[in-house]
Image (tube, grey):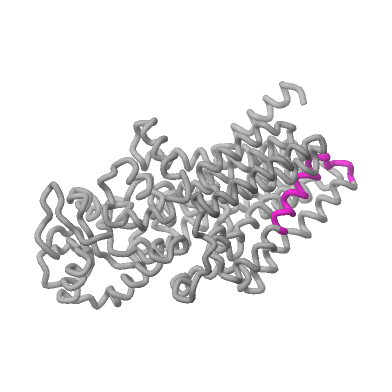
Amino acid sequence: MSGRPRRTGLVAFALCLPAFVLLCTVNSAGYRYGASDQAFYVPAVLEHLDPTLFPRDDALISAQAGLTRTDETLAAVVRASGAELPIVYAILYVVSLTLLGLAGWLLARQMYRSEWAAVALLAALTLRHAIAHSGTNTLEAYFHPRQLAFALGALGIAAFLRGRLAGAVALVLAAAFLHPTTALWFALWLGMATVVAEQRLRIPLAALAGLGTIAGLWALTAGPLAGRLVIMDSAWIATLETKDYLFTPAWPLDAWFTNLAYIPIIVLLYRRRVAGGLASEREHGVVAGCLALVVLFLASLPFVAGHVALAVQMQTGRIFWMLDFLAVIYAVWWLAEGAALTLRRAQAVAFAIVLASTVRGAYVMTVVFPDRSLAQVDVRDDDWGKVMAWTRGTPPESGLMADPQHAARYGTSVRVAGERDVLVEAVKDTAIGMYSRDIAMRTRERIDAVGDFATLTPARARRLAERYGLDYLVTEQELALPTAFQSGALRVYRLRDPLPATGAAHPPR
């Protein structure tokens, strides 16, 4: 490809990019800071930025944060930028979508013959959907390191197709600093693709695989993964009853059907491309590498069924995200080009998918979630936001109690919006429990101790405060307790005397 057509293609992508980011956002019901999985990622980064934060919840945060360098990486970005964390996260959200769009565009320009087909692929990538029974979505309404890692991995596949193996490896390595398991799936995909497409590299790759095996054995026996080959007992498993997607052998039939359906779609459409003389040797490697991930998934099933902790924690069901991505690429090619390309056909498909995404996004924003703005860059300035702003002014050692479902109810958790320890946040604390039996038992014990939050009495609140060293209670109930702050229906009650500025002793974490 000459330099001028390539530059022209990048100009076309740049023109499409604002619409791509907008459609991704509206199909995700708007951008929201502090939502969902950010209940973990934000406190983990905040703790690096200010080590005085979360003295009680450090063990819980470290149960997941200690397995990766994600929080250190993001904290370094915040320090280097000098910007506030919400601003950095909003920028990284746009960067993630930009890189995902660029990956899709480069893959399309390598595999398709029409720029209109590339536009169709970009539009298809805006159609957010869940990967069946995997606990993940193709797009999120907030910045997630997993999304940025996926975009980098997809760029790595595009680089491989263009013959830039060193660049592909560098991109996957960068992804590893953000989300190791997502990067691992791309590394295995890329590795198998290289074995198939680059015969001259098979011996060096075999040597690298051997070194990787040795490194893996060290990690499992003496490194960061030591102790993770234990068998999860029934009590630990019971705490994860709401996370049934983790236990892949017990998936319902519809999840199996949906995820395995990617295989025939990829194979059949790839064979059509081969028959039409459109598939390169490197594309053969890409298909083989992607399908090899299914073999890995199937190989993991006995270990997940045996409740080996590491096998469960790896969440191998998310491998099907990669198959979904490749299947979408092939499906758009079949719709927009097929064996016989016409300009009118490619244009019609592009317009149809753009229209579908636009209508769907408008429906999501105006009917499904009419109260959401297009972008909520910081904690909302509603009653919950005002209470959390007040909370941030309390000593870092303060401990709060709120409805265990408060993150789902108000949109952000106490740890994110108030930057303080909280007795329990049921949704995210339960998920973190998959990485540590102690944390899982801690979370279950605290949820049981709180009981029915709606019927909490002053006497029970004081008993919980004495048991867990709590300072404040956040609730909408009117209780016979001293009020420290109020905004609208939300009240902050003082459960014991205020802490001095230097902090006071608390029970062990």
Residue at 50 percent across and 55 percent down: it is 226
- 346 relative to 317 in the view: left or right: right
Residue 174 placement: quadrant: top right
Looking at the picture, how far across and down is residue 160, in whole percent? Answer: 71, 37
- Report x, y in % for residue 259: 68, 63
Q: Main secondary structure of the magenta part?
A: helix
Question: At which x and y percent is residue 360?
Answer: 57, 56
Q: As drawn, is 377 to the left or to the right of 179? A: left
Q: Residue at x 76, y 49 (%)?
A: 287
Tell me the quarter of the image containing the C terminus. Answer: bottom left
The stretch drawn in magenta includes residue 292: yes
Which region of the structure is painted magenta?
Answer: 276-295
Q: Nearer the viewer, residue 465 or 352?
A: 465
Please tell me whether residue 52 is drawn above or below residue 429 in the rendered image: above
Quadrant of res 194: top right
How many marks overall?
0
Residue 315 vs residue 218, the one in the foreground: 218
The x, y position of residue 237, in whole percent, is 48, 72
